[in-house]
Amino acid sequence: MKKRYLLPLVLFALSSCSKDFLNQKDPNAIQIQDYFKSENDVLLAVNGLYQTLRSGSTIGEGSTLYNEERSDNTGRNDNQSNAGEPFQFNDFSLLPSNTYLKTHWAAMFAGISRCNVILTHIDEVSFSSEGLKQRYMAETKFVRALLLFHMVRKFGDIPMSTVQVTSKEQANELAFRQKESVIYQQIIRDLTDALSSDLPNTQMEYAVGRTSKAAVNAILGQVYLTLGATQASGSAENFAKAEQYLSASYGMRTFGQLKEIPYAQVFDVGMKMQCKELVFQIQYLQGIRTTVRVLHGIIRQKVNLLIRKTKQPGLARLLNWT
């Protein structure tokens, strides 16, 4: 009796198979190519970019391992915890096998990839206004430039893509280190494009935790300040542009002088939604974590360095910093 049903069963199984049998879409996940349908879809994707910045493996709280601990500002004495890997950053004895370094590299490029995905697909969506589309693009380019800026300062020449990578072959073509100059050109292009949008001057006019023209100008000024201090040529021109953009950022403040803002208020989590000195901040849940900020105070610090290097003390009077 069993043999009687064997052949029909085999024939049924064969007829049910197809060449796409192993290429089915995950029913529990939305594919990128099917996601971008509405303005709200783009908004949620842009929100995801800011979420990327919260991670301690990128530039959020806990990321001091990759920057501050490489300076003389902070350090650690424990060289035994976690197999001594964190201590390698402070001690300048990094090994290629360091898992923290690998995690940081992967997380930063994952954030850049998110930006590329949005910019690749945003034209597929119909917007109620061109201004809103350009604003979302400006926010995306700001985040990409910020991440690239952190990476190029740490690693020098790095791989870079400005479009979504969709295949292994495409990834292989991009798997080479591009010159620092090329990376900086892209950073400046992204930030300059962001300034041409209808972003508000300050985050208070938009939403606290989102970028603004003041933040874009601040980072662009820091980029030129870095170029002026590190490149073999063009320092005078770069310092002049740093002054231009940092002054523009400071000029967008909604208060008079820095002394009007209590120093303690700048670092008070309870004031993170009201403090006018905050130019850009990475937002966490209220009361759970602190905020990471780019401050007018930092801009003042950077321009003071600019004044010393360019011997232009009149800049301080121009900015009325008293």
Image (cartoon, grey):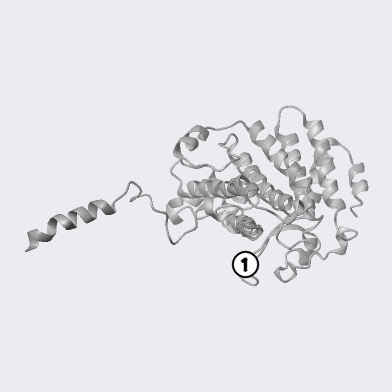
Image-based side of 317 in relation to 78, left or right? right
Which residue is rendered at x = 62% and y = 60% of the image?
44
Q: Quadrant of residue 80?
A: bottom left
Residue 60 shows up from this direction: no
Residue 162 appears at what percent x and percent y? 61, 40
Residue type (three-letter) at the residue carrying disc 1 = Arg
Residues 147 and 80: in front is: 147
Which residue is rendered at x = 77% and y = 59% of the image?
203
- The residue lying furthest to the top in this view is 233
Residue 195 appears at what percent x and percent y? 78, 46
Which part of the image, by quadrant, shows the C terminus?
A: bottom right
Residue 295 appears at what percent x and percent y? 76, 56
Which part of the image, by quadrant, shows the N terminus?
A: bottom left
Q: How many marks?
A: 1
Q: Is residue 254 above or below residue 102?
A: below
Residues 23 and 301: in front is: 23
- Numbered disc 1: secondary structure: loop
Q: Is residue 261 above or below residue 299?
A: below
Image-based side of 7 in relation to 154, left or right? left
- The residue lying furthest to the left in this view is 1
Identify residue for label 1. Answer: 289
Residues 74 and 205: in front is: 205
Residue 283 appears at what percent x and percent y? 66, 63
